[in-house]
Image (cartoon, rainbow, N blue to C red):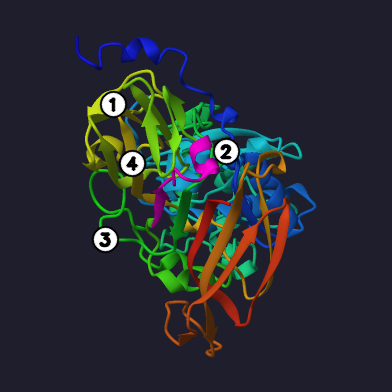
Amino acid sequence: MSKWTLLPVVLAGLLIPLAAAQAAAEGFKVTTDRTVDNSSLESIVADVIRLAGAKTNDEKAIAIHEYLHHTIFHWAYATEKAPQSVGPLKVINVYGWALCGGQHTVLKALFETAGWKCRYVGWPGHTTIEVNYDGKWHYFDTFLKCYYWTKDKSHVAGQQEIAADPSIVLDAVADGRASPENLCCGDPPQGVVDGCKAGKDNGDAKGWASVTWRDDNYSPALTLRSGASVRLDWKSEPNGFAITGKAPQHSCGTKDFRNDKVLGPLMEHYGPRNWSDGLFVYKPDFSKAADVADIDLKDAQASGSRIAASSGKGVAIFKVGIPYCFVTAKLDAAFEGDGKLALSLDAGKTWADTAAGDITALVKQKYEVWIKAEFTVALTKFAVEGQVEHNRSAQPYLYNGKNQVTVATKDNKLPTGAVLKVTYVYQEANAGSANRQFNGNGVTYGEPKTVSKEIDKLPFTFTIDVDSNEPPKMVSLERAVVAK
């Protein structure tokens, strides 16, 4: 009989739910007092309204529209292989881009979270939405980047109002009734009028194209195990995106922020909007109790710097899950005696044999990966390192001036036997020209500055004071769980 024959039996009941992990930091969150917490639709709406100081429903709807204009851009529809799907929070936190129906599905989700009814309105070649509050329908378009006040400036106009009186759009700029970024990607005002005239009510569909109306089996909340870290960079690495095909980049270059007094200084440091990358590392130290506590063991125990088997049939399962999809990944493991590795993408329901080395083909565009090590004597080394994709515009970036940073976890519980570590890296940016194009010209940058905090109590707050006259160029934000 093979020494592996009994493994399916002895593994029964082995897997422990995530909540039972002893040293994982669940919901490891970093927020600032000047940026939006993108961990839920509810937190987004609350922060957007708070930061805008919005009081009326028009003001609240405009604030939500402006937030989404700042956070995502138009390029294509993000798709994932079933059973995975792409919902509003995944669009915001992972990809940062969508076409018209996808963008407006995200906008619709935010408006509905604010408590309002919405409907899709289809134009020839374009999908829009309208939102109903104060007894009227109102038109907001984050794809074309526009909304319009009525002629008497009493409320944001709906499409039927525009169809009945095209001057609501055609004279909006001259009258000071257009959105600040009005049609900044070059679409003609007459096209908006024509679309409103041809629009058809498509009702309250549950999503559009590849974007579902809400997220299914996805949360932006980060659970980080002891011995793991994730660094999110603001730059994009060549080919560092998870989808198949062309590189995702805003179809209109820098048009959307070149003359935007808010979006411009935030975006000009990085060029045309595109994807962003980061680095995830999980390398538990078997001599650290906290690191071992996050490993599911069967017939095995930590012994010095190794995991030793009992009775010649040890098993260790490592659970890797992050809210940013893998682009590339490599696996490292070493054994005393015989050993083998297997990988699961369905939380341990099924396993596929694998080997140390490049596992990109197995985990690309995945979020949760379990790796099983089986060994006759001992497991002496284990590590997973992977490039991940995320949306830099959804991260808690810094502004010039004072930024109060808050670090928290679910229920503000610290992982047992470990501390949290948060590290910001940024470059102060100064611009001297009064008539800026927000294309990077005339901006000078200081040397990279690093602010790192080790956290042993929660919630934890600290202040970063950025001494520049515009928002800094962000380099990275890293979160780690370090065993004591």
Location of residue 281 with respect to 318 vertically, above or below = below
Observer able to see residue 201: yes
Q: Earlier in the sequence, mark 1 or mark 3?
A: 3
Q: Residue at x 56, y 40 (%)?
A: 24
Mark 1 or mark 2, whichever is nearer to me: 1
User: Crowding at label 3, few (<14), some or many (≥20) Cα neighbours within 10 Å?
Assistant: few
Q: Is residue 126 left or right of residue 337?
A: right
- Amino acid at dot 3: Pro
Q: Residue at label 2? A: 108
Q: Earlier in the sequence, mark 3 or mark 2?
A: 2
User: What are the residue bounds of the magenta stretch?
Assistant: 277-293
Q: How far is disc 1 from disc 2 in space, using C-alphas?
A: 55 Å
Q: Residue at label 4? A: 380
Q: Are marks 1 and 3 in contact (CB under 8 Å)?
A: no
Which secondary structure lies at badge 3? loop
- Amino acid at dot 1: Thr
Q: Is residue 274 magenta?
A: no
Which circle marks residue 238 in the picture? 3
Q: Are marks 1 and 2 in contact (CB under 8 Å)?
A: no
Q: How far is disc 4 from disc 3 in space, using C-alphas?
A: 34 Å
Which secondary structure lies at badge 2? helix
Q: How far is disc 4 from disc 1 in space, using C-alphas?
A: 12 Å
State the image quarter where residue 8 is shown: top left
User: Crowding at label 1, few (<14), some or many (≥20) Cα neighbours within 10 Å?
Assistant: many
Q: Residue at x 46, y 41 (%)?
A: 322
Location of residue 333 with respect to 446 vertically, above or below = above
Q: How far is disc 1 from disc 3 in space, using C-alphas?
A: 41 Å
- Amino acid at dot 4: Thr
Q: Earlier in the sequence, mark 2 or mark 4?
A: 2
Q: Are marks 2 and 4 in contact (CB under 8 Å)?
A: no
Q: How far is disc 2 from disc 4 in space, using C-alphas?
A: 51 Å
